[in-house]
Image (cartoon, rainbow, N blue to C red):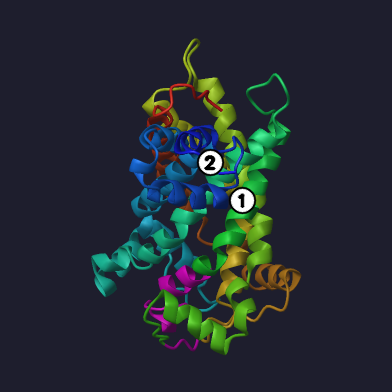
Amino acid sequence: MAISKEETVIMAKDDKPTALQTPITASANLTSSMTTSATADPDFALRARKYVASQTVAAFIAGGVAGAVSRTVVSPLERLKILYQVQGTGGASYTGVGASLTKMWHEEGWRGFLRGNGTNCVRIVPYSAVQFSSYTVYKRMFMEAGRTELDAPRRLIAGGMAGVTSVVATYPLDICRTRLSIHTASLEALGKTGQHIKIPGMWDTMIHMYKNEGGVLALYRGMIPTLAGVAPYVGLNFACYEQIREWMTPEGEKGPGPFGKLACGALSGAIAQTFTYPFDLLRRRFQVNTMSGLGFKYNSIFHAISSIIRQEGIRGMYKGVVPNLLKVAPSMASSWFSYELVKDFLVTFDPDNEPI
């Protein structure tokens, strides 16, 4: 039986997006919705605004913005942390934050401070977008009936699952970012017999690793220790932030002020990083395990841990922790602040939204 034009319009109006969506389907559906002709549906603009204002899509967009802002703010310290982590055991060239930044400036100029940041932003935008939107999805999954907030254990689990989801989705970009961050540095200073490895860009890096270092598996080298570190880190970060946010929210208000949000982000990030930093160091070591000149030949996670402790002591597990902590405060503060600012703006497109 033929369907009239009027019936088609009614069906289009009733075809509302589901309340709970995965980050991937949210992104795909958003693109599809935006490309639909506005003339075919008189309510297209309203429907589009309500869709963008949905909790999952708003979290996806705000998370991407937050990731780009936070990484650019702390790019020099991020690169310095990586250089510390992959230094060989002999003749360390990067020994102090101030001296190392000065050395970077003299050898590479201001571009040295941002080396690898473009690739990092290419990675961090989808990574952060998937992480925040995944947390929103998992948070709803674990929410008990009649409650508006999760308890601490469920926050940890939801955050950990969001961390795992974001890592699996973007890990090849992360390993390429690590390679690009160090390949222009003086590898003679980083290792005993260093050689300069010139890999022009992200895609060439991926192709080089794929062809010469073991195919697809090479692009996921170090992911196991990464997941082991990211899951507790992201879980702690989300759990600490939401708990501290509750404590700092004045009575009768929905949240703390701007400075309160910055403080919440800085504190939650510092706590999470301190507990999980050794996993981050292991991740970097495995990512450069096959690069010549650095002196790292690890067969397994346990072999790596025992080798680091034997050759570098317990402090070896915390190489680079000082610049890392220095970057965590502004990074997480700007990340959470940007996220809440953008998300609060987006959800206002739909006045029926309730905070989650």
Mark 2: amino acid: Ile
Q: Which residue is mark 1?
A: 163
Instruction: Out of 201 and 179, give the one closest to the viewer.
Output: 201
Would residue 91 be seen by someone viewing this image from the given angle?
yes
Secondary element under disc 2, as helix, strand or loop, is loop
Q: Is residue 189 magenta?
A: yes
Residue at position x 61%, y 50% in the image: 163
Mark 1: amino acid: Gly
Mark drawn on residue 3:
2
Image quadrant for the C terminus? top right
Q: How many marks?
A: 2
Q: Is residue 173 magenta?
A: no
Would residue 340 be seen by someone viewing this image from the given angle?
no
Q: CA distance from mark 2 to mark 1?
A: 46 Å
Write down the region rendered in magenta.
175-195
Image quadrant for the N terminus? top right
Residue at position x 65%, y 70% in the image: 308
Residue 234: image location, x then y, percent: 60, 46
